Image: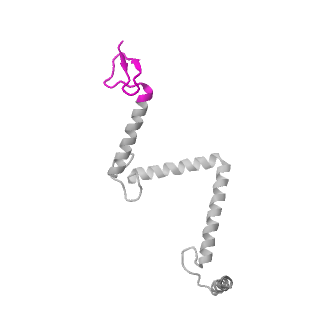
C-alpha cells in the first residue's frame, strides 16, 4: 500500500487508493468547515438564502421566505422545549420580562403617554402631570 502524505499537516497515512488531495480525518473535517464558512460568506455577500441559495426576502437577514418561516418555527419549538424541560429557566425568563416591562411602564408614565404612545386625556392624569412638574420644579 502506498503512503500518501496529508496536504495540510504532512502526516503519512496508508491508503489503498490515494485520493487526488490526500487529507487525514482531522484536516478533512477542518477543510469541510472552511468550505461551509466560505459558502456562507459568499451567500451573505450575494444576499442569498443561507439554506437553499434563493434570493432573500425583505424581512429576514439570512433566509428566503420559506426557509425563514421554517427556521422561525424551529426556533420557537426549540425554545418551547427548553422552557418545558427547565422550570428554573422559565422562572428566570418571567422575572426578566417583569423587570423590563416595569422600566418601560415607568418611562411611559413619566412621559405622560399611554401604551399606544398617545398622551393621557383624562383630567386626573393631567392634574398628576401638573403636580409632578410642580414637584420637580421646586
Q: Main secondary structure of the magenta part?
A: loop
Q: Quadrant of the N terminus?
A: top left
Q: Is residue 108 visible?
A: yes
Q: Position of residue 129 (x, y in %)?
A: 64, 83
Q: Residue furthest left?
A: 20
Residue 7 vs residue 88, the one in the foreground: 7
Q: Residue 118 appears in which quarter of the rendering?
A: bottom right
Q: Residue furthest top?
A: 1
Determine the residue positioned at 58% across, 76% down: 114
Q: Residue 137 appears in which quarter of the rendering?
A: bottom right
Q: Quadrant of the C terminus?
A: bottom right
Q: Is residue 52 visible?
A: no
> In the image, is residue 38 above or below residue 102?
above
Residue 108 vs residue 114, the one in the foreground: 108
Q: Quick check: 13 left or right of 131?
A: left
Determine the residue positioned at 42% across, 36% down: 33
Q: Position of residue 88 (x, y in %)?
A: 68, 50
Determine the residue positioned at 35% across, 24% down: 22
Q: Position of residue 122 (x, y in %)?
A: 62, 85
> In the image, is residue 120 above or below residue 16?
below
84 part of magenta stretch: no
- The region drawn magenta spans 1-27
5 part of magenta stretch: yes
Q: Quick check: 33 left or right of 126?
A: left
Q: Position of residue 67 (x, y in %)?
A: 41, 50
Display coloring? one colour
Q: Residue 105 appears in which quarter of the rendering?
A: bottom right
Number of marks in the image? 0
Amino acid at each position: 500500500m502506498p503512503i500518501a502524505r496529508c496536504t495540510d499537516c504532512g502526516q503519512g497515512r496508508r491508503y489503498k487508493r490515494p485520493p487526488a488531495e490526500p487529507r487525514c480525518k482531522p484536516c478533512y473535517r477542518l477543510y469541510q468547515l472552511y468550505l461551509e464558512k466560505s459558502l456562507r460568506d459568499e451567500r451573505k455577500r450575494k444576499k442569498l438564502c443561507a439554506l437553499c441559495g434563493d434570493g432573500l426576502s425583505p424581512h429576514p437577514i439570512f433566509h428566503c421566505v420559506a426557509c425563514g418561516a421554517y427556521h422561525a418555527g424551529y426556533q420557537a419549538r426549540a425554545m418551547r422545549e427548553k422552557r418545558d424541560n427547565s422550570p428554573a429557566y422559565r422562572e428566570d425568563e418571567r422575572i426578566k420580562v417583569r423587570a423590563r416591562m416595569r422600566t418601560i411602564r415607568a418611562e411611559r408614565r413619566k412621559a405622560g403617554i399611554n401604551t399606544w404612545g398617545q398622551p393621557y386625556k383624562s383630567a386626573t392624569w393631567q392634574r398628576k402631570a401638573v403636580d409632578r412638574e410642580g414637584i420637580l420644579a421646586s
